[in-house]
Amino acid sequence: MIELEGVPELVDPVMVAAFEGWNDAGDAASTAVAHLDKVWKGEVFAALDAEDYYDFQVNRPTVWLDGGVRKITWPTTRLSVIRVGGEKPRDLVLVRGIEPSMRWRSFCNELLGFAHELGVELVVILGALLGDTPHTRPVPISGTTSDPDLARRMDLEETKYEGPTGIVGILQEACTHAGVPAVSLWAAVPHYVSQPPNPKATLALLNRLEDLIDLRIPLGELPEDARAWQLGVDQLAAEDSEVAEYVQTLEEARDTAELPEASGEAIAREFERYLRRRDGGGQAGGHAGDGGDGAPYLREGPADRTRPPKPQRPGTDDEGGTAGGGSEDSPEE
């Protein structure tokens, strides 16, 4: 039995999870959860035992100095809680870690134990995959669920994916079997510029999450980081005529495919988001620049504003293999 000390009773809690590794192309999903933790100053209340789930030859611990004393940080998954006030308060339980190396069923059961004890009403799992999508267009976000009723109520796709899966797919199915409503949000990252960070994909995931749970998320400098990222990739792509031509081909294919969907629904969704931000969205909380540095285990997100790496030539293999090389048309779960 899980015993939680010091965690207050939560209001309509939603669990938001992301895992570094195969399901996290461009670190877009894990950076989104790190952003939530930073802007709302999440408080870590639990960490899973690293010995149970990680191969330390694959995910090695790190050694660091604290006032001259050597300490070790072990790879694990941590849970933190965020209290969001305002007229429509809603609390968040953040789950951020590394995709486990083993015992996935036990891993999911332990997370579901926390969800049960905290009264979580919805689990949202963020992921990012590699796709044939141009960096110059809005990032495609796919929202999927295994629950047909939930798909109808929340305007999501009922997953039809078959094939290899990661911890995102396993956790979603575990939630379904446990009777916990679960949704996966997937961002498609251009395969020719897959190296992290990708603030544009992170921003798109947060915007979709905002719509899904009806909660205004302070974005801070993330929109500016996304514009700077796209400008940097534009400049690098322009230096290689072959890459520039390939990007143009992707743009034409994307524009042709989405032409029938340039309808009032997408426009209305953007307008609703604009109104929610203008009116403050009924919740308190500052912007990203107002927050502290967050917990020491969190990696800095895209705010470092590093120059994007040179886009890979079409047809070359991507190093690292994050997200398994899927496409935006077939997210895992």
Image (spheres, rainbow, N blue to C red):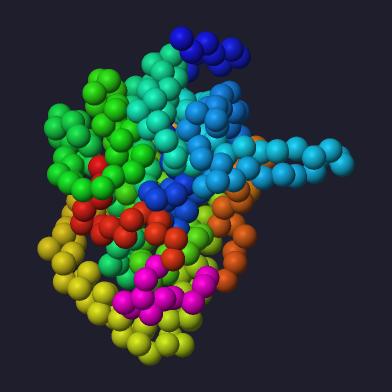
Give the residue drawn at x 42%, y 35%. Answer: 102
Residue 125 placement (x, y as % from top left) = 36, 38
Where is 70 relative to 4, above or below?
below
- Quadrant hosting residue 75: top right
- Quadrant hosting residue 153: top left
Let me know if residue 65 is in the magenta part.
Answer: no
Residue range in magenta is: 308-318
Where is 33 relative to 309, above or below?
above
Give the residue drawn at x 26%, y 31%. Answer: 173
Give the residue drawn at x 18%, y 31%. Answer: 147
Q: Is residue 282 visible?
A: yes
Considering every residue shown, the one lying at the far bottom of the view is 241
Considering every residue shown, the one lying at the far front of the view is 57
Residue 227 placement (x, y as % from top left) = 48, 66
Image-based side of 188 in relation to 296, left or right: left
Residue 278 placement (x, y as % from top left) = 44, 46
Quarter that holds the C terminus: top left
Where is 137 relative to 297, above or below?
below
SS majority, magenta? loop
Closer to us: 111 or 204: 111
Image-based side of 32 in relation to 44, left or right: left
Q: Is residue 115 visible?
A: no
Image-based side of 320 in relation to 305, left or right: left
Residue 260 placement (x, y as % from top left) = 12, 63
Give the residue drawn at x 55%, y 46%. Answer: 57
